Amino acid sequence: MDSTFTSRFQESQIHTSDLFHRNDEHLLVKSASILERAIAKPSKSWTEHDLAHAFVTLDLRQISLMHVAGDGKLKTLDFVPRDHNHFLQILRYGERADGSSLFPGSGITAGASDIVLRPRVQSAFVDPFSQEGTLAILCGHFARSGEPLPQSADTIAHKAYERLLSTAGFELHALGEIEYFIGHKLTGKHDERLDDRGYHAASPFVFGQELRRRALTILSEIGVPVKYGHSEVGFAGAANGADLTWEQHEIELALAPLPFAADSVALTQWVLRNLARDYEMEISFEPVVRKGHAGSGMHFHMAPVIDEQYLLVIDNNREVSESSELLISGLLTHGCSLMSFGNRTPSSFVRLFQGKESPAAVTWGQFNRKALVRLPVTMQDSTGASAYPETVEFRLPDGSANPHLLLAGIAQAARSV
Protein backbone atom coordinates (compact mmCIF):
# COMPACT_ATOMS: atom_id res chain seq x y z
CA MET A 1 0.00 0.00 0.00
CA ASP A 2 1.61 3.26 -1.12
CA SER A 3 2.00 6.44 0.94
CA THR A 4 -0.68 8.31 -1.04
CA PHE A 5 -3.23 5.64 -0.25
CA THR A 6 -2.18 5.68 3.42
CA SER A 7 -2.55 9.44 3.75
CA ARG A 8 -5.97 9.43 2.12
CA PHE A 9 -7.03 6.62 4.41
CA GLN A 10 -5.94 8.55 7.49
CA GLU A 11 -7.96 11.56 6.37
CA SER A 12 -11.13 9.62 5.57
CA GLN A 13 -11.59 6.95 8.20
CA ILE A 14 -14.74 5.91 10.00
CA HIS A 15 -14.08 3.61 12.94
CA THR A 16 -16.57 0.80 13.34
CA SER A 17 -16.99 1.61 17.03
CA ASP A 18 -18.23 5.10 16.09
CA LEU A 19 -21.33 3.54 14.60
CA PHE A 20 -22.57 2.41 17.99
CA HIS A 21 -21.56 5.34 20.22
CA ARG A 22 -24.25 6.86 22.44
CA ASN A 23 -24.17 9.76 24.86
CA ASP A 24 -26.55 8.08 27.33
CA GLU A 25 -24.05 5.37 28.24
CA HIS A 26 -26.04 4.23 31.27
CA LEU A 27 -28.52 2.64 28.84
CA LEU A 28 -27.19 -0.76 27.77
CA VAL A 29 -28.94 -2.70 25.03
CA LYS A 30 -28.42 -6.43 25.42
CA SER A 31 -27.21 -8.48 22.49
CA ALA A 32 -30.00 -9.89 20.36
CA SER A 33 -28.07 -13.16 20.00
CA ILE A 34 -29.39 -15.87 22.31
CA LEU A 35 -25.94 -17.44 22.68
CA GLU A 36 -24.16 -14.13 23.34
CA ARG A 37 -26.61 -13.42 26.16
CA ALA A 38 -26.17 -16.93 27.59
CA ILE A 39 -22.36 -16.88 27.39
CA ALA A 40 -22.00 -13.17 28.25
CA LYS A 41 -19.24 -12.78 25.66
CA PRO A 42 -19.14 -11.54 22.07
CA SER A 43 -19.06 -14.42 19.60
CA LYS A 44 -15.49 -13.69 18.46
CA SER A 45 -14.29 -14.63 21.98
CA TRP A 46 -16.16 -17.95 22.31
CA THR A 47 -14.38 -21.21 23.08
CA GLU A 48 -15.55 -24.83 23.00
CA HIS A 49 -15.99 -24.67 26.77
CA ASP A 50 -18.22 -21.59 26.45
CA LEU A 51 -20.48 -23.48 24.08
CA ALA A 52 -20.50 -26.51 26.40
CA HIS A 53 -21.67 -24.26 29.24
CA ALA A 54 -24.40 -22.74 27.05
CA PHE A 55 -25.43 -26.21 25.85
CA VAL A 56 -26.16 -27.23 29.45
CA THR A 57 -27.58 -23.87 30.56
CA LEU A 58 -30.05 -23.70 27.67
CA ASP A 59 -30.96 -27.40 28.07
CA LEU A 60 -30.02 -28.29 24.51
CA ARG A 61 -29.93 -31.88 23.25
CA GLN A 62 -28.27 -32.02 19.83
CA ILE A 63 -25.50 -30.49 17.74
CA SER A 64 -25.98 -29.75 14.06
CA LEU A 65 -22.92 -29.21 11.88
CA MET A 66 -24.23 -26.95 9.10
CA HIS A 67 -22.39 -26.19 5.89
CA VAL A 68 -22.95 -24.89 2.36
CA ALA A 69 -22.54 -27.65 -0.23
CA GLY A 70 -21.98 -27.49 -3.97
CA ASP A 71 -25.61 -26.53 -4.70
CA GLY A 72 -25.28 -23.42 -2.53
CA LYS A 73 -27.78 -24.61 0.09
CA LEU A 74 -27.25 -25.36 3.76
CA LYS A 75 -26.80 -29.00 4.78
CA THR A 76 -26.76 -30.58 8.25
CA LEU A 77 -25.01 -33.42 10.05
CA ASP A 78 -26.64 -34.06 13.45
CA PHE A 79 -25.25 -35.45 16.71
CA VAL A 80 -26.48 -36.25 20.20
CA PRO A 81 -23.44 -35.73 22.47
CA ARG A 82 -22.99 -38.68 24.82
CA ASP A 83 -21.03 -36.73 27.39
CA HIS A 84 -18.80 -33.67 27.84
CA ASN A 85 -15.79 -35.25 26.12
CA HIS A 86 -17.85 -36.29 23.10
CA PHE A 87 -19.22 -32.72 22.88
CA LEU A 88 -15.68 -31.28 22.81
CA GLN A 89 -14.55 -33.86 20.23
CA ILE A 90 -17.30 -32.81 17.83
CA LEU A 91 -16.47 -29.11 18.18
CA ARG A 92 -12.69 -29.49 18.01
CA TYR A 93 -12.30 -32.04 15.25
CA GLY A 94 -15.57 -32.10 13.31
CA GLU A 95 -16.53 -35.19 11.32
CA ARG A 96 -15.92 -36.83 7.96
CA ALA A 97 -18.44 -36.72 5.12
CA ASP A 98 -18.84 -37.91 1.52
CA GLY A 99 -17.44 -35.15 -0.65
CA SER A 100 -18.52 -36.79 -3.91
CA SER A 101 -22.18 -36.46 -2.85
CA LEU A 102 -21.80 -32.94 -1.46
CA PHE A 103 -19.83 -31.63 -4.45
CA PRO A 104 -20.93 -33.78 -7.41
CA GLY A 105 -19.13 -33.16 -10.67
CA SER A 106 -16.27 -31.31 -8.95
CA GLY A 107 -13.60 -33.99 -9.39
CA ILE A 108 -14.05 -35.71 -6.01
CA THR A 109 -14.37 -39.39 -6.85
CA ALA A 110 -16.35 -42.00 -4.93
CA GLY A 111 -13.10 -43.96 -4.46
CA ALA A 112 -11.45 -41.13 -2.51
CA SER A 113 -14.36 -39.02 -1.34
CA ASP A 114 -13.67 -38.41 2.37
CA ILE A 115 -13.67 -34.75 3.40
CA VAL A 116 -13.84 -33.21 6.87
CA LEU A 117 -16.42 -30.77 8.22
CA ARG A 118 -14.61 -28.55 10.72
CA PRO A 119 -16.78 -26.33 12.97
CA ARG A 120 -16.19 -22.59 13.42
CA VAL A 121 -16.99 -22.06 17.09
CA GLN A 122 -17.76 -18.35 16.64
CA SER A 123 -20.57 -19.15 14.17
CA ALA A 124 -22.70 -21.17 16.62
CA PHE A 125 -26.36 -20.40 17.25
CA VAL A 126 -29.47 -22.03 18.69
CA ASP A 127 -31.51 -23.53 15.86
CA PRO A 128 -34.83 -21.63 16.00
CA PHE A 129 -36.70 -24.34 14.09
CA SER A 130 -35.62 -27.43 16.03
CA GLN A 131 -38.00 -28.94 18.56
CA GLU A 132 -35.14 -30.99 19.98
CA GLY A 133 -33.09 -28.07 21.31
CA THR A 134 -30.20 -27.92 18.85
CA LEU A 135 -26.88 -26.07 18.82
CA ALA A 136 -26.06 -25.31 15.18
CA ILE A 137 -22.51 -24.51 14.04
CA LEU A 138 -21.30 -23.52 10.58
CA CYS A 139 -18.40 -25.52 9.19
CA GLY A 140 -15.65 -25.21 6.65
CA HIS A 141 -14.62 -28.08 4.35
CA PHE A 142 -11.18 -29.69 4.49
CA ALA A 143 -9.47 -32.31 2.36
CA ARG A 144 -7.86 -35.50 3.62
CA SER A 145 -4.53 -33.62 3.65
CA GLY A 146 -5.85 -31.15 6.20
CA GLU A 147 -5.87 -28.30 3.68
CA PRO A 148 -9.06 -26.32 2.91
CA LEU A 149 -11.09 -28.14 0.27
CA PRO A 150 -10.56 -26.33 -3.07
CA GLN A 151 -14.00 -27.34 -4.41
CA SER A 152 -15.80 -25.64 -1.53
CA ALA A 153 -17.39 -22.22 -2.18
CA ASP A 154 -16.67 -21.43 1.47
CA THR A 155 -12.96 -22.07 0.87
CA ILE A 156 -13.02 -19.96 -2.29
CA ALA A 157 -14.67 -17.03 -0.49
CA HIS A 158 -12.15 -17.07 2.38
CA LYS A 159 -9.16 -17.29 0.01
CA ALA A 160 -10.42 -14.44 -2.18
CA TYR A 161 -10.98 -12.28 0.89
CA GLU A 162 -7.46 -12.97 2.18
CA ARG A 163 -5.88 -12.49 -1.27
CA LEU A 164 -7.46 -9.06 -1.68
CA LEU A 165 -6.18 -8.01 1.74
CA SER A 166 -2.65 -9.18 0.97
CA THR A 167 -2.45 -7.52 -2.46
CA ALA A 168 -4.59 -4.37 -2.15
CA GLY A 169 -4.03 -3.68 1.53
CA PHE A 170 -7.67 -3.54 2.62
CA GLU A 171 -10.38 -5.92 3.73
CA LEU A 172 -13.70 -6.02 1.94
CA HIS A 173 -16.93 -6.01 3.93
CA ALA A 174 -20.25 -6.65 2.22
CA LEU A 175 -23.98 -6.89 2.74
CA GLY A 176 -26.74 -8.40 0.68
CA GLU A 177 -30.21 -7.04 -0.02
CA ILE A 178 -32.41 -10.14 0.06
CA GLU A 179 -35.52 -9.57 -2.05
CA TYR A 180 -38.10 -12.36 -2.13
CA PHE A 181 -41.71 -13.05 -3.06
CA ILE A 182 -44.29 -14.49 -0.67
CA GLY A 183 -47.17 -16.33 -2.34
CA HIS A 184 -50.51 -16.88 -0.64
CA LYS A 185 -53.99 -18.07 -1.60
CA LEU A 186 -56.10 -15.11 -0.53
CA THR A 187 -59.77 -15.34 0.36
CA GLY A 188 -62.04 -12.31 0.43
CA LYS A 189 -61.48 -8.85 -0.98
CA HIS A 190 -58.22 -6.94 -0.50
CA ASP A 191 -58.53 -3.33 -1.51
CA GLU A 192 -55.99 -0.59 -2.20
CA ARG A 193 -53.38 -2.90 -3.67
CA LEU A 194 -52.13 -2.38 -7.18
CA ASP A 195 -49.57 -4.30 -9.17
CA ASP A 196 -46.03 -3.09 -8.43
CA ARG A 197 -47.21 -0.54 -5.84
CA GLY A 198 -46.22 -2.18 -2.55
CA TYR A 199 -43.12 -0.21 -1.51
CA HIS A 200 -43.04 0.18 2.31
CA ALA A 201 -46.68 -0.93 2.51
CA ALA A 202 -47.92 -1.85 5.98
CA SER A 203 -50.47 -4.35 7.25
CA PRO A 204 -53.34 -4.81 6.47
CA PHE A 205 -52.32 -3.97 2.91
CA VAL A 206 -49.64 -6.69 2.91
CA PHE A 207 -49.98 -10.22 4.27
CA GLY A 208 -46.25 -10.98 4.63
CA GLN A 209 -45.41 -8.35 7.25
CA GLU A 210 -45.64 -10.71 10.24
CA LEU A 211 -43.44 -13.31 8.54
CA ARG A 212 -40.85 -10.65 7.64
CA ARG A 213 -40.76 -9.22 11.17
CA ARG A 214 -40.42 -12.70 12.63
CA ALA A 215 -37.50 -13.31 10.27
CA LEU A 216 -35.74 -10.14 11.45
CA THR A 217 -36.00 -11.26 15.07
CA ILE A 218 -34.80 -14.79 14.35
CA LEU A 219 -31.84 -13.56 12.29
CA SER A 220 -30.76 -11.29 15.13
CA GLU A 221 -31.13 -14.13 17.63
CA ILE A 222 -28.89 -16.46 15.60
CA GLY A 223 -26.21 -13.79 15.13
CA VAL A 224 -26.88 -12.62 11.56
CA PRO A 225 -26.32 -8.82 11.45
CA VAL A 226 -29.46 -7.15 10.08
CA LYS A 227 -30.02 -3.58 8.92
CA TYR A 228 -33.77 -3.45 8.20
CA GLY A 229 -36.72 -5.02 6.42
CA HIS A 230 -39.67 -3.66 4.45
CA SER A 231 -42.32 -4.45 1.88
CA GLU A 232 -41.06 -3.97 -1.67
CA VAL A 233 -42.67 -2.65 -4.83
CA GLY A 234 -43.50 -5.99 -6.43
CA PHE A 235 -47.10 -7.19 -6.16
CA ALA A 236 -48.91 -9.54 -8.53
CA GLY A 237 -52.50 -10.39 -7.73
CA ALA A 238 -54.06 -13.73 -8.59
CA ALA A 239 -55.35 -13.46 -12.14
CA ASN A 240 -55.65 -15.33 -15.44
CA GLY A 241 -55.95 -18.73 -13.77
CA ALA A 242 -53.16 -18.18 -11.21
CA ASP A 243 -54.31 -19.03 -7.68
CA LEU A 244 -51.44 -17.37 -5.78
CA THR A 245 -51.13 -13.70 -4.99
CA TRP A 246 -47.48 -12.69 -4.80
CA GLU A 247 -46.06 -9.79 -2.84
CA GLN A 248 -42.45 -8.77 -2.55
CA HIS A 249 -40.41 -8.03 0.58
CA GLU A 250 -36.79 -7.21 1.33
CA ILE A 251 -34.41 -7.82 4.20
CA GLU A 252 -31.21 -5.83 4.02
CA LEU A 253 -28.36 -7.24 6.06
CA ALA A 254 -25.56 -5.31 7.79
CA LEU A 255 -21.94 -5.10 6.69
CA ALA A 256 -19.73 -8.05 7.61
CA PRO A 257 -16.38 -9.41 6.40
CA LEU A 258 -16.88 -10.88 2.95
CA PRO A 259 -17.01 -14.64 3.77
CA PHE A 260 -19.37 -14.04 6.70
CA ALA A 261 -21.55 -11.79 4.55
CA ALA A 262 -21.98 -14.78 2.22
CA ASP A 263 -22.90 -17.00 5.19
CA SER A 264 -25.46 -14.40 6.26
CA VAL A 265 -27.20 -14.56 2.87
CA ALA A 266 -27.38 -18.36 3.02
CA LEU A 267 -28.76 -18.26 6.58
CA THR A 268 -31.31 -15.58 5.68
CA GLN A 269 -32.70 -17.64 2.82
CA TRP A 270 -32.77 -20.70 5.12
CA VAL A 271 -34.73 -18.78 7.78
CA LEU A 272 -37.20 -17.40 5.24
CA ARG A 273 -37.82 -20.81 3.69
CA ASN A 274 -38.51 -22.33 7.11
CA LEU A 275 -40.87 -19.52 8.07
CA ALA A 276 -42.77 -19.80 4.79
CA ARG A 277 -43.37 -23.47 5.58
CA ASP A 278 -44.54 -22.61 9.11
CA TYR A 279 -46.88 -19.89 7.82
CA GLU A 280 -48.15 -22.20 5.04
CA MET A 281 -47.10 -19.76 2.35
CA GLU A 282 -45.00 -20.13 -0.76
CA ILE A 283 -41.67 -18.34 -1.06
CA SER A 284 -39.60 -17.62 -4.14
CA PHE A 285 -36.18 -16.06 -4.67
CA GLU A 286 -36.64 -16.34 -8.43
CA PRO A 287 -35.66 -13.18 -10.32
CA VAL A 288 -39.19 -13.03 -11.81
CA VAL A 289 -42.29 -14.87 -10.55
CA ARG A 290 -44.66 -13.49 -13.17
CA LYS A 291 -43.78 -11.92 -16.50
CA GLY A 292 -44.31 -8.17 -16.67
CA HIS A 293 -44.03 -7.51 -12.93
CA ALA A 294 -41.13 -6.20 -10.86
CA GLY A 295 -38.45 -8.82 -10.35
CA SER A 296 -36.25 -9.61 -7.36
CA GLY A 297 -32.63 -8.56 -7.31
CA MET A 298 -29.97 -9.35 -4.75
CA HIS A 299 -27.90 -6.19 -4.74
CA PHE A 300 -24.62 -6.29 -2.84
CA HIS A 301 -22.99 -3.33 -1.11
CA MET A 302 -19.24 -3.34 -0.48
CA ALA A 303 -17.13 -1.24 1.88
CA PRO A 304 -13.29 -1.28 2.09
CA VAL A 305 -11.88 -1.56 5.62
CA ILE A 306 -8.43 -1.07 7.15
CA ASP A 307 -7.72 -1.80 10.83
CA GLU A 308 -11.45 -1.98 11.64
CA GLN A 309 -12.00 1.43 10.06
CA TYR A 310 -14.29 1.96 7.09
CA LEU A 311 -12.84 4.05 4.28
CA LEU A 312 -14.85 6.73 2.55
CA VAL A 313 -16.00 6.05 -1.00
CA ILE A 314 -15.88 9.77 -1.80
CA ASP A 315 -12.92 11.35 0.00
CA ASN A 316 -12.60 14.80 1.51
CA ASN A 317 -11.57 16.21 -1.88
CA ARG A 318 -14.88 14.95 -3.37
CA GLU A 319 -13.02 12.39 -5.43
CA VAL A 320 -13.53 8.64 -5.54
CA SER A 321 -11.04 7.13 -3.09
CA GLU A 322 -8.38 4.76 -4.36
CA SER A 323 -9.82 1.64 -2.77
CA SER A 324 -13.30 2.37 -4.14
CA GLU A 325 -11.86 3.13 -7.57
CA LEU A 326 -10.34 -0.36 -7.63
CA LEU A 327 -13.68 -1.86 -6.67
CA ILE A 328 -15.75 0.16 -9.17
CA SER A 329 -13.29 -0.47 -12.01
CA GLY A 330 -13.24 -4.20 -11.27
CA LEU A 331 -17.04 -4.42 -11.28
CA LEU A 332 -17.35 -2.47 -14.53
CA THR A 333 -14.66 -4.58 -16.18
CA HIS A 334 -15.81 -7.99 -14.98
CA GLY A 335 -19.49 -7.44 -14.15
CA CYS A 336 -20.69 -9.50 -17.11
CA SER A 337 -18.46 -12.42 -16.12
CA LEU A 338 -19.85 -12.28 -12.58
CA MET A 339 -23.25 -13.21 -14.00
CA SER A 340 -22.00 -16.80 -13.89
CA PHE A 341 -22.35 -16.62 -10.10
CA GLY A 342 -24.99 -13.93 -9.66
CA ASN A 343 -27.56 -14.54 -12.42
CA ARG A 344 -27.96 -18.28 -12.81
CA THR A 345 -31.49 -18.96 -14.11
CA PRO A 346 -33.35 -18.21 -17.35
CA SER A 347 -35.60 -15.74 -15.53
CA SER A 348 -32.45 -13.79 -14.59
CA PHE A 349 -32.46 -12.46 -18.14
CA VAL A 350 -36.21 -11.80 -18.10
CA ARG A 351 -35.62 -9.52 -15.09
CA LEU A 352 -32.92 -7.59 -16.93
CA PHE A 353 -34.90 -7.24 -20.18
CA GLN A 354 -38.00 -5.99 -18.35
CA GLY A 355 -35.86 -3.05 -17.27
CA LYS A 356 -37.58 -2.17 -13.98
CA GLU A 357 -34.67 -0.66 -12.02
CA SER A 358 -32.40 -3.41 -13.37
CA PRO A 359 -29.03 -2.64 -14.99
CA ALA A 360 -29.43 -1.99 -18.70
CA ALA A 361 -25.83 -1.00 -19.50
CA VAL A 362 -22.32 -1.04 -18.03
CA THR A 363 -22.49 2.31 -16.26
CA TRP A 364 -21.89 3.73 -12.80
CA GLY A 365 -23.08 6.78 -10.90
CA GLN A 366 -24.68 8.17 -7.78
CA PHE A 367 -28.32 8.50 -8.84
CA ASN A 368 -29.34 6.10 -11.59
CA ARG A 369 -30.94 2.93 -10.22
CA LYS A 370 -30.46 1.26 -13.61
CA ALA A 371 -26.68 1.62 -13.33
CA LEU A 372 -24.58 -1.50 -12.95
CA VAL A 373 -22.67 0.14 -10.09
CA ARG A 374 -24.20 2.83 -7.88
CA LEU A 375 -22.90 4.99 -5.03
CA PRO A 376 -25.91 5.32 -2.73
CA VAL A 377 -26.47 8.30 -0.45
CA THR A 378 -25.23 8.01 3.15
CA MET A 379 -26.81 9.85 6.06
CA GLN A 380 -24.69 12.61 7.59
CA ASP A 381 -24.09 13.81 11.12
CA SER A 382 -24.25 17.44 12.31
CA THR A 383 -20.77 18.14 10.90
CA GLY A 384 -21.63 16.87 7.43
CA ALA A 385 -19.55 13.70 7.83
CA SER A 386 -20.95 10.28 6.91
CA ALA A 387 -22.70 8.77 9.90
CA TYR A 388 -22.59 5.26 8.41
CA PRO A 389 -20.09 3.46 6.20
CA GLU A 390 -20.22 4.53 2.58
CA THR A 391 -20.68 1.68 0.13
CA VAL A 392 -20.35 0.70 -3.52
CA GLU A 393 -23.50 -1.07 -4.71
CA PHE A 394 -23.45 -3.81 -7.37
CA ARG A 395 -26.98 -4.04 -8.77
CA LEU A 396 -26.69 -6.89 -11.28
CA PRO A 397 -27.14 -10.06 -9.12
CA ASP A 398 -30.52 -11.61 -8.30
CA GLY A 399 -32.00 -14.23 -6.00
CA SER A 400 -30.45 -17.10 -7.97
CA ALA A 401 -26.95 -16.00 -6.89
CA ASN A 402 -24.45 -18.24 -5.14
CA PRO A 403 -23.33 -15.64 -2.55
CA HIS A 404 -19.98 -17.26 -1.71
CA LEU A 405 -18.82 -17.54 -5.31
CA LEU A 406 -20.23 -14.15 -6.26
CA LEU A 407 -18.50 -12.29 -3.43
CA ALA A 408 -15.28 -14.18 -4.12
CA GLY A 409 -15.56 -13.05 -7.73
CA ILE A 410 -16.09 -9.43 -6.66
CA ALA A 411 -12.95 -9.58 -4.52
CA GLN A 412 -11.01 -11.01 -7.45
CA ALA A 413 -12.38 -8.29 -9.75
CA ALA A 414 -11.20 -5.59 -7.35
CA ARG A 415 -7.63 -6.87 -7.40
CA SER A 416 -7.50 -7.46 -11.15
CA VAL A 417 -7.35 -3.84 -12.33
Image: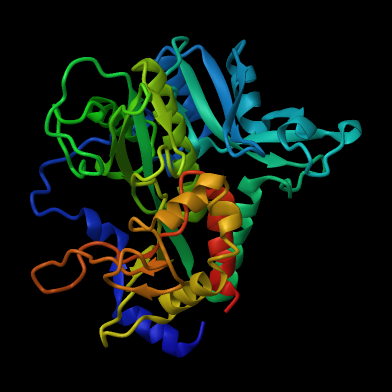
Q: Position of residue 417 (x, y in %)?
A: 57, 79
Residue 302 percent across, percent down from the top left: 41, 62
Q: Position of residue 74 (x, y in %)?
A: 56, 32
Q: Is residue 231 left or right of residue 255?
A: left
Residue nearer the viewer, 76 or 167 = 76
Q: Quadrant of residue 390?
A: bottom left
Can the viewer see residue 128 in this picture?
no
Looking at the image, residue 233 lies above or below residue 333: above
What residue do we see at 37% from left, 16% from top?
Answer: 278
When the figure is inspected, residue 261 is found, relative to residue 312, above or below; the finding is: above
Q: Going by the picture, which residue comes out furthest to the front?
A: 240
Query: Is residue 210 toward the left or the right of residue 83 in the image?
Result: left
Give the image's coloring scheme: rainbow
Q: Is residue 203 above or below residue 360?
A: above
Q: What residue is rendered at 12% in x and 48% in y?
A: 25
Q: Is any part of residue 286 visible from this angle?
A: yes
Q: Nearer the viewer, residue 370 or 353?
A: 353
Task: List x then y, in percent, for residue 64.
Answer: 56, 22
Q: Nearer the viewer, residue 188 or 169?
A: 188
